[in-house]
Amino acid sequence: MINKVLSKYFIAISFYMGLVASAASHTYFFGVSDVFANPNTQHLEIVHLFTTHDIENAIAENKQIHFSAEHKNYDLYIQQYFEQQFTLEKNRVKIPLSWLGFEITSGRIIAYQESKEQSLLPQTVVKNSILIDTYPKQVNTVNFQGVDIKGKALFGSLTFDYRLKEAIITPIISQ
């Protein structure tokens, strides 16, 4: 009798753990960053949107620590991670990005950066390896919007994954 009851509990617990595991994990790994050349301030504004627990796992793996929101250096490690994994360069010179902060909403982290440099997007090199080294299936999209040297609208997207961690913003030439 006890074996039957334990067996039923074991099956129920196994079923429940399977549901929890499938809900907690996901098969799609993607993130989005937007780079916007603000015409009023002439600054580049960057907004990143990623899954919070993926960022936390990447930091935990990188630093070989248990990492969660309760960690005493949580904000600092989040900032360092984004600053190390996402950079912009122009003429082989790194464009300084100021960290504005981040917020967590519905399991997503939204991180904000800004450049006080003049916002000339064409030929800007974007380096984006956010989560790519941790999750081989990670795909990141960087949307950009601004103007080219002639003042024409410049917008588009770049895609990054384990094969491509660097790309150049180039104007689309129409024929």
Image (cartoon, rainbow, N blue to C red):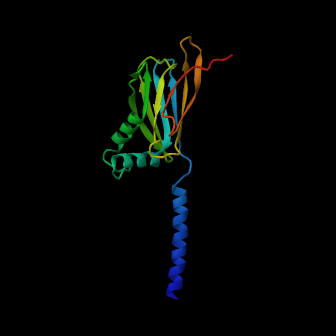
Where is residue 88? Give x, y as percent: 44, 26
The residue drawn where x is 55% and y is 15% is 148
Q: Quadrant of the C terminus?
A: top right
Frontmost residue, 119 versus 103: 119
Where is residue 103? Give x, y as percent: 44, 40
Residue ranking furthest to the left = 72
Q: How many marks?
A: 0
The residue drawn where x is 44% and y is 16% is 118
Frontmost residue, 102 versus 138: 138
Where is residue 138? Give x, y as percent: 52, 43
Frontmost residue, 137 versus 55: 137
The residue drawn where x is 38% and y is 45% is 59
Indicate the quadrant where residue 144 lies: top right
Indicate the quadrant where residue 156 lies: top right
Q: Is residue 162 above or below residue 90?
A: below
Residue ranking furthest to the front = 163
Residue ranking furthest to the top = 150
Q: Is residue 151 above or below residue 54?
A: above
Residue ranking furthest to the right = 175
Question: Left or right: 80 with respect to 107?
Answer: left
The residue drawn where x is 33% and y is 46% is 63
Where is residue 160? Give x, y as percent: 52, 35
